Image (cartoon, rainbow, N blue to C red):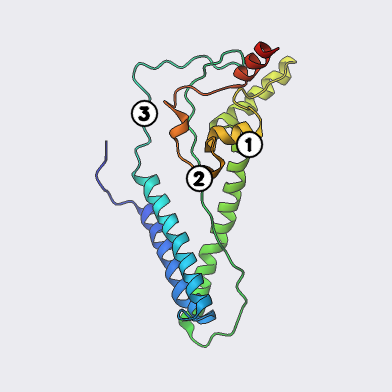
Amino acid sequence: MRKGFTFSLPVSVVVLAIFYIYFTTVFIFIDRWFGLMSSPGLMNAIVFTAVALMCVFSYTVAILRDPGRVPADYMPDVEDDQNPMHEIKRKVLLVGSLTNDSLEDELQTGGSFRTAYVISGLLLVPLSVALSVLLGWHIYLIFHNKTTIEYHEGVRALWLAEKGGTVYKHPYDLGIFENLTSVLGPNIFSWICPSSRHIGSGLNFRTAYHNAVGASMSK
């Protein structure tokens, strides 16, 4: 079900920031460094435009796509490492790229150009730091096949296991390569632009229990 369009201040701020960074980069920085009509300038403008379009497309899809909902008759199973069927787990994968070239400070005669540099720096520095931290965090989650909620649940489960003298292992952790394929898909070439077709219904996910059963049956 699609919802009607309503004004959103955070979305408007993000869209304005994207367009501001795009226009200042292409029509101020690239134009002044290389010249838009030169071969290097035109190539840089084309590449940056492609990256900007991918960012806008990804952000638009993230806003407009219906995230889905749990079926009314679905009952989650108790989550333990001996049960092959586990409760619903939703992965949110943020895939993006940010190109942030280091700018050499040069003398500017016009105040407008100096203002553009300052505003772009104020936007790009915190964005670069925040996105770098977020990227590293999501890489860690993918390597361990966890969601953010499962990470915090795992911290408590690990503490309880150590307190009880047992060993806790995240049931969805299948190994780094298996974790990558379960999140991004079995085809390595699709990792550049992953989809959710391989997930199936999204109600059940393979666990380490399946690997243990398969290994025991093969012996």
| Sequence-earlier tag: 2 or 1 | 2
Is residue 144 visible in this depiction of the protein? no
- Residue 143 is marked as 1
Dividing the image into 4 quarters, which one contains the N terminus? Answer: top left
For the residue pair 81 and 48, the one nearer the viewer reads as 48
The amino acid pointed to by label 1 is Phe
The amino acid pointed to by label 3 is Arg
Kindly identify which residue carries mark 3: 69
Give the left or right position of residue 184, taking residue 57 as reference: right
Dividing the image into 4 quarters, which one contains the C terminus? Answer: top right
19 versus 103 height, above or below: above
Mark 3 to mark 2 CA distance (whole Å): 20 Å
Mark 3 to mark 1 CA distance (whole Å): 26 Å
Q: Position of residue 53 (x, y in %)?
A: 41, 59
Kindly identify which residue carries mark 2: 94
Give the left or right position of residue 18, taking residue 177 as reference: left
- Which residue is rendered at x = 60% and y = 18% of the image? 210
Residue lying farthest to the front in this orientation:
218
For the residue pair 202 and 187, the one nearer the viewer reads as 187
Q: Secondary structure at mark 2?
A: loop
103 versus 166 height, above or below: below
| Sequence-earlier tag: 3 or 2 | 3
Q: Position of residue 42 (x, y in %)?
A: 47, 74
